Image (cartoon, rainbow, N blue to C red):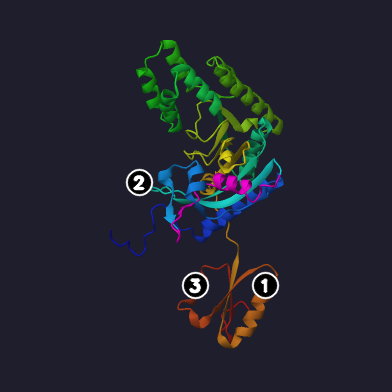
Amino acid sequence: MSKPFMFEKPIGMRDTLPNLYATKKQVRDRLAAEIALWGYQTIDTPTLEFYDTVGEASAILDQQLFKLLDSKGHSLVLRPDMTAPIARLVASSLKEASFPIRLNYQSNVYRAQQHEGGKPAEFEQVGVELIGDETVSADGEVIALMISSLQRAGLSGFKVAIGHVGYVDALLLDVVGNEDRALVLRRYLYEKNYVGFRQHVKELNLSSIDKDRLLKLLKLRGGKEALQQAADLIQTEQGEKALAELTQLWDVLESYGMDEYVKLDLNLVLHLSYYTGVVFEGYGNDLGVPLSSGGRYDQLLEKFDRPAPATGFGVRLDLLVEAIGKRAEREPVTCIIFSKERREEATKLALQKRQEGVAVVLQDLSGVADVDRMSEQYDEVIYSIGKSKKGGQ
């Protein structure tokens, strides 16, 4: 293996320059402020977790995990998401806390990229988990909170697509008859490969009526009217139960005044086995990929010996910043350039201005090769250099 060039970074890793950092901080702070108003408590978890616990329980594919060994030979992973670590925390450090528990986080997560050039392997998520509440009201709360948080962050013109794993599973199993055949179709939906889905349906040994039912699944998008169209395709108790939950959910979102931001997408599949009920994705400003997602995952806590229903969402901060499209305005910075004999005077002036809330850089004149060029990066320049003083102070 050749040695990397001096300026190379590992695949998927990125530098964050000052202006982007300031923008991300501004957006992050707005998200956090809105989430706090809804009563969610902030936590953090270790960057490193055991593979045998959090790694295996995570919804992230095994080949996307960063794995390493500690000094005792234990397999570790860089946390690939925050849901599994929070489930571990709730089952351990918060095992005495009564349900429901409302938690939020602002954390970097890590997912190895193999051949996907340009995709980040490290990115920041801001999100919430509502644990211990199985009601549709809880599903509605996290969706409404996600919408409210995106609004607070400055995003406009976005939509949230809502589906239900139970409906997709019920329809596929009812039509194709067994889990293996349903899994093939579900994978096409997960990959959003609708062309492949249609082609596969055409090749199945099914009646024209059943093929039509599967193909109509792809068209189940829109407002509340899509629920009736979905009901016409389903004939099982599981499917009817899922549609009843979506009907209740729509009513909940109407009570929040959030229904204008949502649309139903009954073929939405976010993961092949992780989610158990309502799922959703947020899209904004022609970004092309979802900038937020979430859903109900009622079986994860069982893996940590504290069974509980749960739901939540995560927002990709980098994608949200891109969708908003506005960079934060840089805070004004004053530079005081001083000669050594005027150091005390310059220092006192800097202290005074900082107490007034002004950001100040103190720069020794002897450490500057080109004063004029350096001065261009500051909003105000004050010279404190004795007889050769050029202006300002």
Can residue 156 be seen at all in this image of the molecule? no
| Mark linked to residue 115 | 2
Q: Tell me where the magenta segment starts and ends, as one range.
A: 70-97
Q: Which of marks 1 and 3 is in front?
A: 1
Pick the quarter of the image with the N terminus: bottom left
Dot 3 lies on which element?
Answer: helix
Pointer 2 or 1: first along the chain = 2
| Mark linked to residue 249 | none
Q: Name the residue under label 1.
A: 353
- Any magenta on residue 87? yes
Q: Which residue is drawn at 51% across and 49% down?
A: 318
Few, some or many C-alpha atoms within 10 Å of disc 2 (few <14, some 14-19, many ≥20)? few
Q: In which quarter of the image is residue 230?
A: top right
Q: Report x, y in % for residue 191.
A: 43, 33
- Determine whether 165 is above or below 337 in the image: above
Q: Which amino acid does label 3 sit on?
A: Met
Separation of marks 3 and 2 at Cα, in angstroms: 41 Å
Q: What residue type is labelled 2?
A: His
Q: What residue type is labelled 1?
A: Lys
Taking the image as shown, residue 168 lies to the left or right of residue 10, namely: right
- Determine whether 257 is above or below 377 in the image: above
Few, some or many C-alpha atoms within 10 Å of disc 1 (few <14, some 14-19, many ≥20)? some
- Any magenta on residue 68? no
Dot 1 lies on which element?
Answer: helix
Pick the quarter of the image with the C terminus: bottom right
Q: Name the residue under label 3.
A: 374
Q: Nearest the camera: 148 or 13?
A: 13
Q: Report x, y in % for residue 26.
A: 60, 54
Separation of marks 1 and 3 at Cα, in angstroms: 21 Å
